[in-house]
Image (spheres, helix red, strand yellow):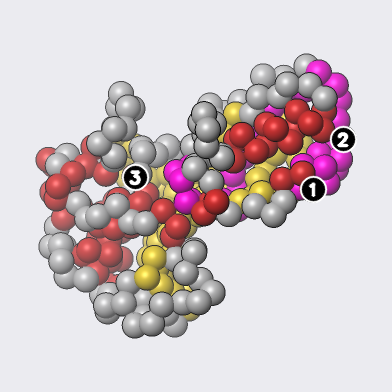
Amino acid sequence: MSSYKLTVEYDGKRFSGWQRQLGQRTVQGVLEEALSTMLRQEVKVQGASRTDAGVHAIGQVAGFESEEDVEPARLVRGLSALCRPDVAVVHAKVMPDGFNARFDSTGKHYRYRVLNRRAPSALNGNTAWHVPQDLDLDRMRAAADDLVGTHDFAGFRAANCERETTVRTLTEVIVNREEEDVITITVKGTAFLKYMVRIIAGTLVGIGLGKLPPDTIGRLFETGDREIAGMTAPAHGLTLMEVFY
């Protein structure tokens, strides 16, 4: 068996998330169907990140094994043709035996975009959360600094998150004004809990709006109380940018 690594880009709005689900259209399901058709064998795909319904990706990584050797260039051409227009395979690489896209990963980079102006966008409405009220970037940046490091992120996860440990390490959390009316929240870390980045984004926006106090992050680490945090930001503002190995 030969092992392969795919770098995958997709528009999340037409999918029920990454993970295969019975009766639902998912990115994993689309890739597996395309690979099985192309290689004429049953193919199972592992994903580095189980992105939620509506979440986009520029640098998702998928791994699979094949009974026959396949040229990476052929994989890029064939899969992009079979999966268009919602999914594109932008790179393929032969990997050592036993490569696992999820468990071999050492970290991930996510970006959350906020459209911060009075009017909604006709063009960017599917890739940014529209927040029409003024945001205090200094407050958001100070709170973002508090997130960096190794902490117990129990207050930043979904109610149905099944992870046994909630201690995670974030290496970078940066709030920037990308354009005059677009704010980006960059989050990099070694591993993430379910909805963690979206709750971080919702909490930072809540602090920027003045709806949450500046010490919210510290209180969340101390108590683990999800009720203290901000809302879970909408999925469509989130993009998986890169997976590290």
How far is mark 1 from mark 2, CA to CA? 16 Å
Q: Residue at x 60, y 29 (%)?
A: 46
Of marks 2 and 3, which one's residue comes earlier in the chain? 2
Residue beneath label 1, please?
Answer: 81
Q: Is residue 124 left or right of residue 131?
A: right
Q: Amino acid at mark 2?
A: Glu
Q: Residue at x 60, y 35 (%)?
A: 28
From which residue to which does the magenta span run? 51-80
Q: Residue at x 22, y 63 (%)?
A: 206
Q: Quadrant of the N terminus?
A: top right
Residue beneath label 2, please?
Answer: 71
Residue 89 falls inside the magenta stretch:
no
In the depicted structure, whether residue 236 falls above or below residue 32: below
Residue 30 drawn at (x, y percent): 65, 38
Residue 58 falls inside the magenta stretch:
yes
Q: Secondary structure at mark 2?
A: loop
Q: Secondary structure at mark 1?
A: helix
Of marks 1 and 2, which one's residue comes earlier in the chain? 2
Residue beneath label 3, please?
Answer: 196
Front-lying residue, 159 or 177: 159
Q: Quadrant of the C terminus?
A: top right
Q: Amino acid at mark 1?
A: Ala
